[in-house]
Image (cartoon, coloured by chain):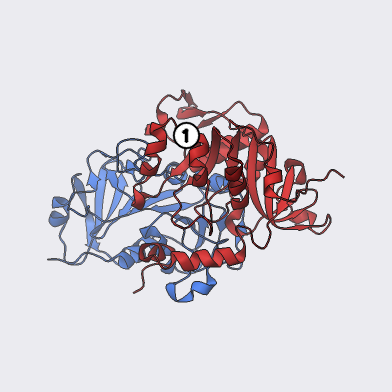
Amino acid sequence: MKQRLDEDTMAMRAAKELKDGDCANLGFGLPTLCALYVPEGIRFEAEAGILGYGHLVQGNEVDKADWHYIDASGRFVTPAPGMACFDVVDSFIMIRSGRLTSIMGGFQVSEKGDLANWNTGSGMFGGTIGGAMDLAVGAKRVIIMMQHNTKDGKPKIVKKCTYPLTAKEAVDLIVTDLAVIEVTKKGLVLKEVAPGWTAKEIQALTEAKLIVAKDLKEIEL
Amino acid sequence: MINKVFSSFDEAVADIPNGASIAIECWGYPATPENLIAAIKRKGTKDLTVITHTFIPMVWPEEDAVLPALLLPQMKKLITSIAGIMSLGAGAFLKEYIEKGLEVEIVGHGTLAMRLHAGAAGLGGIYDPIGIGTLLEEGKEKRVIKGKEYLFQEPIKPDYAFVTAYRADKLGNLVFKGGWRGDQPMMAMAAKTTIVEADKIVEVGEIDPEHVVTPGVFVDRIVEIPPDGYGTPEKGAKLIALLTQIGSVRDQLFGKIK
């Protein structure tokens, strides 16, 4: 069987979207890993009200864990020079005014860029919203980092989301363990594929129709 | 000078009546006014409305740390943006209480903070772009302003706010630390009565006026966290040690060990 990208490689590819001077919010789960792979000059924001935190506390330095400094996933982070603390209204004004790039996880993305990433049930109690809706609607750019398929092989990039929506027409770019896909007005454009995979093979694992980019290439880090 | 300093948490919550609404800061475990939560549990106040950003079940013994979920049997209504933990079945833990009549209102975190801010400022509500095209639309007035859709959201004006601060002076001026400021300035401003538990209470003049985050006019009662109280550095360190013994939680807090 062909190899898919591992989580760290996906994080490296998603992190590559961030440029010097960008401020970004990393969502719950997988996107947190991006903090390990960004170049200098990127600042991260956590909804609780910190911008510009330092590195993630690793398992071999538990003594550095301080409950005052945690990211959106509840992972311990470290204070860093230039860090700013503020309240949640300021935090969500940052998010809603398009000053941040959002890298979030996803359950489903539709061909129009609709996002479902808070709820795997059908009612209000099948998931948790937190700041996801604010980020999806308000961020400068919404990058979804997720597995291409569910654990039982079903497509997550679909014609129409079946899970409750986080926001409509919100997603700009999808980074999966198989591909990098851009959401455009014309539809989903397959821009990059994992090494060894063809556009045809990826389309077969995707419910939504993919437009293959003229300059389709292997994922570069 | 009016004395805002109370000697015990029980005394600070003594007048809270059945049916009161309380805004309580919580970010999972961190930034939770645990001692005040424990005091209202001891008091047994009923029919509470709890407004909090994160409402999740406690996965540790009550003597180590408490969360707003400790109050579930005393609640009639919950307003929150995080009801449960996805890996533990999200809102499933609320089911038995909902069957017994608990009302739950789910709202995005930014919207929750801005509704508190609106309540504090005396606004009649906000028109909010968040939630358009989602389950949150249900039962909400929708309005188009300059070509864009918005949902009407009512202000929140709690009877009480429970706040945890890093430093409080005797006038109630507050300083927070790290990411613990959270929703607390809005909660303190929106509530009729704000009760603070502080790591330390200092004399008037000891806090640099340029560093005050919440001015004392928004604060009514202050209690210093005693060495054997909840939320001390020792209790925090013990909780980390406890949580790192649970494999899945350890991975969550520190990443998978490779």
Snapshot quadrant of residue B48? top right
Q: Chain of mark 1?
A: B
Secondary structure under the numbered disc 1 in the rendered image: loop
Q: Residue furthest right?
A: B1
Residue A90 at least partly seen: no
The mark total stands at 1
Asked whether residue B153 appears in the rendered view, the answer is yes
Give coordinates of residue B231: x percent, y percent: 60, 58
Up-down relation of residue B29 to residue B78 (above or below) = below
At label 1, the amino acid type is Pro
Q: Is residue A59 left or right of residue A4?
A: right
Q: Nearer the viewer, residue A139 or A54?
A: A54
**Considering the image in quadrants, where does the C terminus of chain B appear?**
bottom left
Q: Name the colour assigned to chain A in the rendering.
A: blue
Colour used to depict chain B in the structure image: red
- Point out residue A86 in the picture as x, y percentages from the top left corner: 62, 52
A145 sits left or right of B195 in the view: left
Q: Nearer the viewer, residue B169 or A211?
A: B169
Give the residue displayed 46% in from the left and 66% down from the top: B242
